[in-house]
Structure formats: structure tokens, C-alpha cells
Image (cartoon, rainbow, N blue to C red):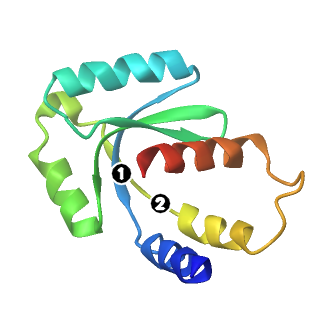
Amino acid sequence: MPETSATADVDDSSQQNYYLIYGSFALRSDAREAVKRFINSGFKEAEMLPSGDRFRVYLSKHSNLKDAMAAKEKLNTSYKEAWILKEYTTHVLRTWSAISFQGVLNHSLKNLFKFNERKK
């Protein structure tokens, strides 16, 4: 039974996500403050997305490019710098889930797993 559950989790994670990114920060604390500001400004989905040694902040997350582009078009001019990021992590996670984790995860993948677990 656990194998079926694990397979379902992997199948669920195959969906690609598109993030409407508005900022990138070196410090987690700065990214958290930006998320709070965006939420208070009406972007209820705003969240932090670890990326290497930086923390990207997104305004919204979408399951397809068309919706992400539509959301970007609806932004007022003060957010014209926003851009769309396609998530490639599902393939990385599938690859890493198929091999041993003993001492091979680098810092950014550890943060990615923590982030994904927090989102479940």
C-alpha cells in the first residue's frame, strides 16, 4: 500500500507550475517581508520560492502558461517588471527520488524539499 501512495505522490507532482515572479532576494528575511507586503496589497498567493542562494518572491502560481500570461497582463503598471518562471523541479525531484539520498543533496535541494513539504 505505501508504494501505491508514493506512486500517486509522484504522479501528482508531474504537473508543471508557472510562477509570476516579482522579486529576488539574497536574504530570506527580506523575501519574507516582501511576501507580507504583497499579501497586504492583495496578492493572497504571494510566497517565497528558494532558488540556489537566493529567494524569489512570486505574486501568483498557475498550472499553465496561458493563465500565467493572463495574470501578468492584468497587473497594473507598478508591477510591469514581473516575469514568468516555469518550474523544472519536478524532474529533479523524480530523479533524486530514484537514488539514494545519503550525503548527495546539496544545500539548494534541501531547501527545495523543505519548501515543498511546507506547501503540502
Q: CA distance from mark 1 to mark 2?
A: 8 Å
The relative height of residue 10 versus residue 71 in the rendered view (above or below) is below
The relative height of residue 2 versus residue 36 in the rendered view (above or below) is below
Q: Residue at x 75, y 40 (%)?
A: 107
- Looking at the rendered structure, the kind of residue marked 2 is Glu
Q: Residue at x 35, y 59 (%)?
A: 18
Circles 1 and 2, Cβ within 8 Å, touching? The answer is yes
Q: Residues within 10 Å of mark 1 (few under 14, many from 20)?
A: many
Image location (x, y in percent) of residue 27:
57, 19
Q: Point out the image quarter for the N terminus.
A: bottom right
Q: Which residue is mark 2?
A: 87
Image location (x, y in percent) of residue 110:
69, 45
Look at the numbered disc 2 and give the secondary structure of its residue: loop
Image location (x, y in percent) of residue 39:
22, 27
Q: Which residue is mark 1?
A: 19
Q: Which image quarter: residue 21?
A: top left
Q: Is residue 118 left or right of residue 93?
A: left
- Looking at the rendered structure, the kind of residue marked 1 is Tyr
